[in-house]
Amino acid sequence: MIQSYRLAQGRLLPVQRLDAEVMLFCNPDLGERDLLHSAFKLDEHALASALDPDEVSRIEFHPDNLFLIWKRPENYSGGGSLAFEVSSCGLLFSPDRLLVIATDDGQLDGLGQRQALHTPLDVLLDLLLGNIHHYLGHLKVIKMVARELQQQFNASMENRHLVQMFNLSESLIYYINAIHSNGAVLTRLRNHAEKEHFSPQAVGLIDDLIIENNQCYKQAEIYSTVFSGLIDARGNLMNNNMNSLLRKLTLINVVFLPLNLLASIGGMSEFSMMTAGTPWWVSYPLFLSAMGLGAGAMVLGLKRLAKTP
């Protein structure tokens, strides 16, 4: 699907042209791929990279244009997995045109609200700024979800809460990698802007992008470190609780296993034979007393062992 826009009145206006100033190629089909190859000289490798969610951010400089692979956060839809995904998009920029190649049609939504758009470069920089703010918004959501998960984990200690925390921690790792690679692209774009004598406003905006991207990276890094510590602490807490339960079960077994042995002996006919000369109302109370003394001695011995460092 192709969406075309022209720049007028500081914003994007939809048009029905294939030579518009800004064009969005959403999951291009075979015919749209041929158009990208023939009209815009975009090779197959670059096109495949733009649609590959695992592609690393990079920037390529050509005589007439530059091509960026940019890592962007996907819209969070909720659900039980609590996973935040990242994907890639391709940006083919020239002074008179910007092509956006992505897997969804929401890349140009909201552009023009932060600043007026007069050139394709304005659209490019506003798009990159919007993606950085998208990352920051997701980090805030991750922080709120983490607090809720901690409360639920403290209340129930269920494994699914720990799994959800693992998913969030994994998402943060992907975010850190994506934001870091985007930062390298912005640095090279800044150098290119100086070399090509971009306007001072554009260079200043690129500097702002670098600063905000670095802040976003540091924030994601801090959250990842906190999550790793929380997961380790929760795992150790679950292990301690399990060890405490197993210790109690072991104590119960140690106390009752010898008693079961004595009770088995007392229930046999050999016990009646051994106490044939003793009245039953004497032999059985003595036997029960011996069992009680044995159990008490066992408990005292275990308590002393438990106190021994």
Image (cartoon, grey):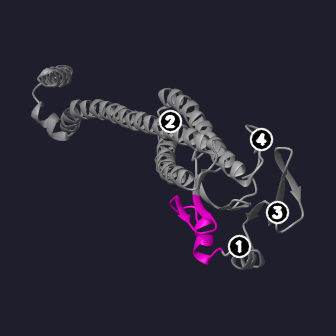
Q: Nearer the viewer, residue 29 or 125?
A: 125
Dot 3, how many residues are within 10 Å of its Cα: few (below 14), some (14-19), or many (20+)? some
Asked if the residue at tag 2 contacts the one at tag 3, i.e. Cβ–Cβ closer than 8 Å, the answer is no
Looking at the figure, which quarter contains the C terminus? Answer: top left
Q: CA distance from mark 3 to mark 1?
A: 12 Å
Which one is earlier in the sequence, the residue at label 2 or at label 1? 1
Q: CA distance from mark 3 to mark 2?
A: 35 Å
The residue at the point 60 percent across, 63 percent down is 66
Q: Residue furthest front?
A: 197
Which amino acid type corresponds to the residue marked 3 in the rendered image?
A: Ala
Q: Is residue 251 left or right of residue 20?
A: left
Q: Which mark is residue 215?
A: 2
Dot 1, how many residues are within 10 Å of its Cα: few (below 14), some (14-19), or many (20+)? few
Which amino acid type corresponds to the residue marked 1 in the rendered image?
A: Phe
Q: Is residue 132 left or right of residue 258?
A: right
Q: Quadrant of residue 247?
A: top left
Q: Which mark is residue 20?
A: 3
Which one is earlier in the sequence, the residue at label 3 or at label 1? 3
Asked if the residue at tag 1 contacts the one at tag 3, i.e. Cβ–Cβ closer than 8 Å, the answer is no
Dot 2, how many residues are within 10 Å of its Cα: few (below 14), some (14-19), or many (20+)? some
Report which residue position mark 1 lands on: 40
* Residue 198 sits inside the magenta stretch: no
Which one is earlier in the sequence, the residue at label 3 or at label 4? 3
Q: CA distance from mark 4 to mark 2?
A: 25 Å
The residue at the point 55 percent across, 41 percent down is 207
Q: Is residue 288 above or below residue 259?
A: above
Q: CA distance from mark 1 to mark 4?
A: 26 Å
